[in-house]
Amino acid sequence: MKYLIDPRLKQGKANLHCHTCLSDGTLTPQEVKERYMAHGYDIVAYSDHEILHDNSYLTDENFVALTAVEYSVNDPAPYWRDEKCFHFNLFSHDPHNTFHVGSSERNAGRYFARFKDEFRCDGYDRVFTKECVNEVIRRAREAGFLVQLNHPNWSLNTREDYMMLDGLWGLEILNYCTELETGTEYCPIIYEDMLNHGKRLFCTMGDDNHNDGGRDFGSYGGVTYILVDTLTYDNVFASLEKGNFYCSSGPRIRSLAIDGDRVILECDPAMNVVLTSKNRRFKNVFGEGLTHVEFDLDKDCEYFRITVMDDKGGRANTNAYFESDFRD
Ligand SMILES: [Zn+2]
Ligand SMILES: [Zn+2]
């Protein structure tokens, strides 16, 4: 038997998308740490717009501040509400890395003036073309970043847009703030589409909280649980890199194991558990208060992923596990 979600590991509770007063949020990084820790979180990725900040002074034995940034690439339109874009979260392998790859003074935009004394970049100007965005992803990966596509619906991304991206580490399948605002940002269907057409990437959930007026609007709704033995920056990053995590807007997954062709799941009480694999190869277990579910994998499944649905509308989503990885 092999664990894909190992019950012996700690599940570090993470918000992988957050803004502070260093960009257009209102709380200080310290205040974000305090509020999230009060809600049981262990990890926050500080993904302020355009400028990397080293918030590692906030990391201690009970908390990891991931160094991150959110890059925008806009396809100019006369009115911003019609403007298509890509927003990427870059998570840094090195907590102290504040060098901007795939960025320019123009890209840093309104934040450049505020941080110009410390802003360092490779001067690669981002524009909305296939070649350019893929070069940004390539440069970011080479510099030790994991690159995530954020809120594809808010960004007005079409299938052509997200399918042209190469080298993505992850897709944000729930952006809680935008989901509250639009009702369209829980988007496992986009993850599904990418998986079914040759992309291999992980899925996450995040809040994208800005805390306007100091309120908690958009907080504590999109959680990524990262499995670690001890909570350190390096362990958290290594688990992200390997896909050793799952995400949830409610129920927890306690354990996921594979034993031959059998998939064995332990979870919080659920009313439906789905095993999804390529195209229309799905299986369900329906019930009340399901906490232990088993499935038989089909021979030609190629990959599978699990969705746990509770009776309050919460969803837990695993990453896709590919046969080539889980078969020894
Ligand atoms: Zn964004
Ligand atoms: Zn954001």
Image (cartoon, rainbow, N blue to C red):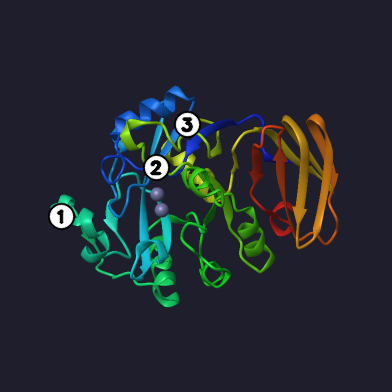
Question: Of the numbered discs in the image, which one, if any, rests on residue 113?
Answer: 1
Is residue 193 placed above or below 249 in the rendered structure?
below
Q: Nearer the viewer, residue 102 or 18?
A: 18
Above or below, comparing residue 62 to residue 151 in the picture: above
Label for residue 319? none
Q: Percent x, y for residue 284?
A: 83, 45
User: Going 29% across and 64% down the picture, which residue do you hit?
Assistant: 103
Task: Mark 1: give few (<14), some (14-19) or many (20+) Cα within 10 Å.
Answer: few
In what element is the residue under mark 3?
loop
| Cα–Cα span, label 2 and label 1 | 22 Å
Question: In the image, what residue type sits under mark 1?
Answer: Ala
Per the model, the C-alpha gap separating discs 3 and 2 is 20 Å
- Looking at this view, is 27 or 97 the one in front? 27
Disc with the residue nearer the chain's start (2 vs 1):
2
The reply to whether the residue tagged 2 has its Cβ within 8 angstroms of ligand 2 is: yes
First reached walking from the N terminus: tag 3 or tag 2: 2
Question: Horizontally, is 281 left or right of 200 in the view?
Answer: right
Write down the residue under mark 3.
231
Residue 138: percent from left, percent from top: 42, 67
Up/down of 238 relative to 152, above or below = above
Q: Residue at x 32, y 31 (%)?
A: 214
Pinpoint residue 119: horizontal percent, then vertical percent: 20, 55
Q: Identity of the amino acid at label 3?
A: Leu
Name the residue that disc number 2 marks: 18
Which of the marked residues, 3 or 1, is nearer the chain's N terminus? 1
Q: Is residue 282 left or right of residue 130?
A: right
